[in-house]
Amino acid sequence: MSFRFSTFELDMERRELRRDGSAVPVEPQVLDLIAFLVNNQDRVVSQEQIFDAVWEGRVVSLSTLTSRINAARAALGDSGQSQTMIKTVPRRGYRFVGGAAPANGENLSPSEGSAPAVIRPASTQEIRFCETPDNVRIAYSTVGDGEPLVKAGNWLNHLEHDWDGPVWSHLLKWMASKWQLTRYDARGNGLSDWDVDEISFDAFVRDLESVVDAAGLETFSLFGASQGCAVSIAYAVKHPERVKKLVLYGGFALGRRLRGSPQDNELIDAMLTLMRAGWGQENPAFRQVFTSNFVPGGSAEQVDWFNNLQRITTSPANAVRIRSVSDMLDVTHLLEQVKAPTLVLHCREDAMQPFEEGRRIAARIPNSSFVGLEGKNHLILEKDEAWPRFREAVCAFLES
């Protein structure tokens, strides 16, 4: 069986690794190691599993394994620092993250548990910058082929870290394998300008306007997640001639402070105080409060990654400003004005935004459909029961 990923092809019938059509010199045992990792790319494999598969259970030292991992990375143009192909998962093992897909359209053989969707490797993303009317630099990227799909900015994005991280990567690379995906870091976070005068809901809409103009997109489908749903709704109403279809996941039309009780608002104030005091600290205890709502069912790796992402992608002051905008947004008056066909998806036990918020959006947008998903994660994870249903529903909607 052959696999393609990035500029490589792994041909196990010929026992050959090729890059741009030319054979790459690889020791047989290193080739076996690469093949084992690629065949099990949907999961982390332990050192013991590698020993059993590659060394057939023979006793070898950890230094031997490390040497073979280093050789495999070198053959793939990877390193222990970048880990773009082979990722070390501390205390658990290794995982291939290069996005391999069967070269001839065959199906991957499932490993333990259910197999993930086969994703064609998307091209390496190229990050560019555009400028908003108020002179804020916004970082954006476009990757993939096909019909254009734009992802609106949401709570704390980072173009580089999201692309390869364990929380967002599966969603982004799946989208880029099927459509031409354009996404960006909204002002105040990620690779976009942090030191900005205005962080407001209207400014977030202007960020989206600036990105699609800079990317040269005339018409496109628009995907929003969490607070990105409200931004997407506002843009779709303001520019109905440009939005072909609208996909809204885990969204809300009315911020928590506007729909909450006085007791709820006291809790919101307490959360903002926590953010001011501890957001930038190495100790993740302060940020864990937010992570536990976004990915309550996440693995230790995903929780640690999301904790760190929140710390490095914005400042404590900006985290408070962005969160305050989210808590006060209101697009309820715009829902009936949405012209684009709309798909609304929401997890039934969403720990961050109640299931009822998604139903309210769908009930008031004309020509909309609603899909309830099983699960409690606000950000849909690759191992979630809802992930296959999410892909199926979004594909059916955007490709109809």
Image (spheres, rainbow, N blue to C red):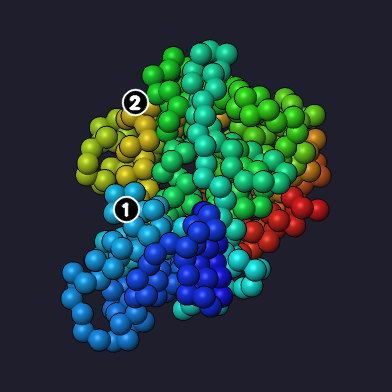
State the residue at coordinates (32%, 30%): 316
Residue 116 to residue 243: above or below: below
Q: Are marks 2 and 1 in contact (CB under 8 Å)?
A: no
User: Can I make out residue 266 in this image?
Assistant: no
State the residue at coordinates (38%, 67%): 26
Instruction: Check the picture and name the quadrant holding the N terminus.
Output: bottom right
Instruction: Tell me which corner region of the image, top left, top right, bottom left or bottom right, holds residue 213.
Output: top right
At label 2, the amino acid type is Ala
Q: Nearer the viewer, mark 2 or mark 1?
A: 1
Of 281 and 110, the residue lying toward us: 110
Q: Is residue 371 left or right of residue 19?
A: right
Q: Residues within 10 Å of mark 1 (few under 14, many from 20)?
A: some
Residue 334 to residue 363: above or below: above
Return the mark for residue 120. Answer: none
Instruction: Tell me which corner region of the image, top left, top right, bottom left or bottom right, holds residue 194.
Output: top left
Determine which residue is flagged by label 2. 317
- Give residue 182's position: percent from left, percent from top: 60, 38
